[in-house]
Image (spheres, helix red, strand yellow):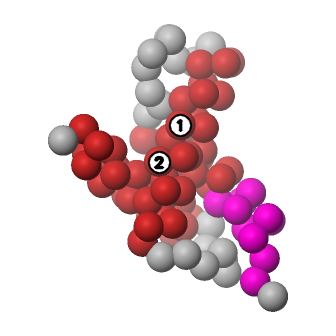
């Protein structure tokens, strides 16, 4: 059940990130979900490295959205539509 919950939260985070930073990155619901999940992991990793979060805790919703925006930006830079 935890994996399903993570996917649902990832979808919400990815959707918010794509709403904040629209563009021609493409991708459907699966890419949006993966974007949100990866964004949450990136935000948690950076937050633990800087000292915002204790070891073993995850990032909050806002930090996860910021991480997803960062991943979306990188995705848009590396995957260009021809």
Which residue corresponds to the image point at 68% horizontal and 18% vertical from the top-left?
A: 50
Tell whether 30 sits left or right of 65: left
Number of numbered discs visible in the structure rendering:
2
Q: Nearer the viewer, residue 64 or 38?
A: 38
Residues in magenta? 72-81
The kind of secondary structure element at disc 2 is: helix
Which residue corresponds to the image point at 65% horizontal and 60% vertical from the top-left?
A: 72
Say which mark, if any, is on residue 41: 1
- Residue 81: which quarter of the image? bottom right
Above/below status of 15 relative to 82: above
Q: Does the segment drawn in magenta span residue 77?
A: yes
Q: Is residue 16 visible?
A: no
- Indicate the quadrant containing the C terminus: top left, top right, bottom left or bottom right: bottom right
Q: Nearer the viewer, residue 20 or 24?
A: 24
Residue under circle 2?
37
Dominant secondary structure (helix, strand or loop) of the stretch shown in magenta: helix
């Amino acid at each position: 059940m935890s994996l399903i919950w993570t996917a649902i939260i990832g979808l919400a985070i990815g959707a918010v990130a794509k709403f904040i930073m629209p563009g021609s990155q493409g991708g459907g619901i699966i890419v949006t979900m993966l974007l949100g999940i990866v964004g949450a992991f990136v935000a948690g990793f950076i937050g633990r490295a800087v000292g915002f979060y204790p070891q073993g805790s995850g990032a909050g919703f806002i930090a996860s959205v910021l991480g997803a925006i960062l991943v979306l930006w990188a995705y848009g830079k590396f995957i260009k539509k021809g």
